[in-house]
Image (cartoon, grey):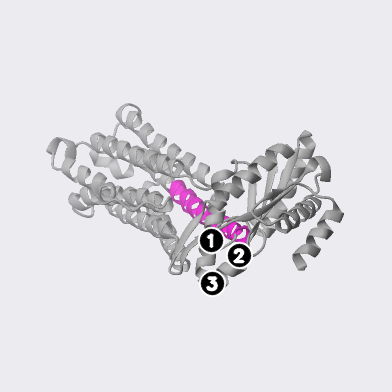
Amino acid sequence: MSLHVPTILFLTVLVALLTGMLLIFSWAQNRLHRSLAWWGVANLLGGAGAALLAARGSIPDFLSIDLANALLFCGYGAMLSAARRFIGRPADARLLFGGAALWLIACQLPAFHASAAARVCFISFGIAAYSWTIAYVLIRGQTERLASRIPAAIWVCLHGASSLVRIPICLVALPLKEANLISHPLIGFFAVEAIVQLIAMSFLQIGMEKERDELHQKLAAQTDELTGAANRRSVLERADALLADCRARHVSAAVLLLDLDHFKSINDTFGHDVGDGVLRATAQTFSEVLRKGDLFGRVGGEEFACCLPNTSPLEAIAVAERLRAAISKLCLMSPGGAICVTASVGVASTNRDGYDFAELMKAADAALYEAKARGRDRVVNEVSPPAYALASERLAS
């Protein structure tokens, strides 16, 4: 099958411009997606460069060789900037314009400028370097699990590899001659590969941003806005899964219910802003004391719950004591003076109450009532229902 190279180059320009405008339009819908704007600019620069290349012979060589490929390199620099913006890093002018600057410097060498093979080798190596750097940035900067991220990195790596393949082809298999360069079949294959690259990476980039939005929305729905801990709904859903896994593995688990003592008086005396600071400090304490696989969240105004998988009753009491002691050491400064905080903790274990989270919460709540009835700032293990009723009466009186 023969390729009509001018037609393929025209399609390359058209696809580059269309995908560039699509990406910029997508960015305009959400200005937080700055990587899409950068990627759109990259495609537009690439399209402009391809248009100048396609006009070879009709315009001066400075435009169709020097400027055309400088624009292509700026396009790849913009792609790298898009990858950096996607992972939250700023664009770097050296990376954006560095490839184009080196190209323009090389073009000042007469021998280099007169050799089509030398120019193709330079461009191919530059594209590979940019492509592999983009892949590295995408993988190295991974902070969320995005399904499109790995395919995007793999695809851009393959694009870089295909660029390097051009070097032996143009040197050995299909030597390039200046006279028929623009109609050479190798240029046509380069253009076809560029079209596929433009379409694939544009959709993958949009896909990554869409996945990130969905992930952030999901996290927002599962997170307590004030403390950053899991909210009640998230705790209920995730605790059931943790307990089901413990049941399947025949290991113990425990649930802690912690309540800050006299929290209402802190709000009344020092204000809600100070009370919010106490809640945030408490959540931070949980993060520091608990293990990586433990679950905790804010389930009420000043109430926090923990689910401790693979934990015996004695281990759960020890964890609860560490939490209580760490919170008792909190001392927050406010305009009204120092604020010291204490907490009461109720503990329930699957050894007694089974693996149903709702039942474990009831048992932990009963223990928490008993801790408050005994004077607060203490940990109480599971109590019987009569003791729970007695503690409730003492607190109410």
Q: Which residues are magenta?
A: 195-223
Dot 2 or dot 1, earlier in sequence:
2
The image position of residue 163, as x and y in percent, is 37, 37
Type of amino acid at the residue the image marks with label 3 = Thr
The residue that disc 3 covers is: 269
Q: Quadrant of the C terminus?
A: bottom right
Residue with the most extreme right position: 386
Give the quarter of the image for residue 389: bottom right
* Badge 3: residue crowd in 10 Å (few <14, some 14–19, many ≥20): few
Judge by depth and name the residue closer to the eye, 350 or 204: 350
The image position of residue 167, as x and y in percent, is 32, 31
Residue 181's disc is none
Type of amino acid at the residue the image marks with label 1 = Val
The residue that disc 2 covers is: 263
Q: Is residue 360 left or right of residue 33?
A: right
Q: Is residue 387 left or right of residue 175?
A: right
Asked if residue 206 is among those painted magenta in the image, a careful observer would answer yes
- Counting labels gives 3
**Do the residues bearing badges 2 and 1 touch, measured as CB atoms within 8 Å?**
yes
Task: Label 2, secondary structure: give it.
Answer: helix
Dot 2 or dot 3, earlier in sequence:
2
* Badge 1: residue crowd in 10 Å (few <14, some 14–19, many ≥20): many
Residue 278's disc is 1
Real-space CA distance between mark 3 and mark 1, rounded to the nearest whole angstrom: 13 Å
Compared to residue 141, the image places residue 85 above or below, namely below
Q: Residue at x 36, y 38 (%)?
A: 186
Q: Residue at x 18, y 50 (%)?
A: 62
Type of amino acid at the residue the image marks with label 2 = Phe
